Image (cartoon, helix red, strand yellow):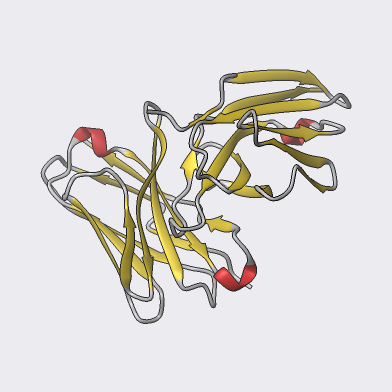
Amino acid sequence: DQQVKQNSPSLSVQEGRISILNCDYTNSMFDYFLWYKKYPAEGPTFLISISSIKDKNEDGRFTVFLNKSAKHLSLHIVPSQPGDSAVYFCAASRNNAGNMLTFGGGTRLMVKP
Amino acid sequence: KAGVTQTPRYLIKTRGQQVTLSCSPISGHRSVSWYQQTPGQGLQFLFEYFSETQRNKGNFPGRFSGRQFSNSRSEMNVSTLELGDSALYLCASHDANSGNTIYFGEGSWLTVV
């Protein structure tokens, strides 16, 4: 049972435009969500996170939106840059589960110059 | 300060052998967790250690084990290696006093032949 899903395996956008990456979850016990960026054969790099008590968190060009009723979160990157091209993973955790992250399958973002 | 350090970065082992991977967390971080990334299964949680005690364990066979030392450094061991164990093994560290963000190392790329 895949508790965190990223239904789009890939996304292609033009430089300067908005990139929107989506993530759905099924476990209502998740209360903290994170987005990571990853290059091949490297570890994930933390981008931004959001607690379930919020519906939006913004950090520079990155904004994460959380819709708890829909069990859906999204990452917006504005404006997109070629250096943003990577695989993006969303992850979820439960407060009483230590630091166990459940990851989605990832979305490969390609930003074209 | 230094990030999460994993050694070795790359290694090749033969089926049936065993392997030990090492992880040094960010200074001051007491929680260390391990993840496996494969093309077919994505990023999956292996186990988490806090103050030398295993706090959570993922759904992996007993061939996968780990430990944490008093200085928070951690090792994971895989015995009787199988071809399917070929993967990127990622270590992550966390400090509860710094919020819920989990930081990853560069990973150890294991190939089993």
Instruction: Examine the rendered structure and indicate whether residue B40 appears above or below residue B46.
Output: above
Residue name at image x 53 percent, y 45 percent = A30
| Relative side of A54 to A60, left or right | left
In the image, A51 versus B3, the foreground residue is A51
In the image, B84 versus A104, the foreground residue is A104
Residue B98 image offset from top left, x and y in percent: 63, 69
Q: Residue furthest front?
A: A69
Q: Quadrant of the N terminus of chain B?
A: bottom right
In the image, B25 versus B47, the foreground residue is B47
Residue B91 image offset from top left, x and y in percent: 43, 56
Residue name at image x 83 percent, y 26 percent = A18
Residue name at image x 17 percent, y 37 percent = B82
Q: Quadrant of the C terminus of chain B?
A: top left
| Relative side of B67 to B97, left or right | left
Q: Quadrant of residue B83?
A: top left
| Relative side of A46 to B112, left or right | right
Instruction: Examine the rendered structure and indicate whether residue A102 appears above or below residue B53.
Output: above
In the image, B43 versus A3, the foreground residue is A3
Residue name at image x 25 percent, y 44 percent = B60
Give the mark count.
0
Residue B40 image offset from top left, x and y in percent: 37, 26
Residue B78 image offset from top left, x and y in percent: 21, 51
| Relative side of B92 to B41, left or right | right
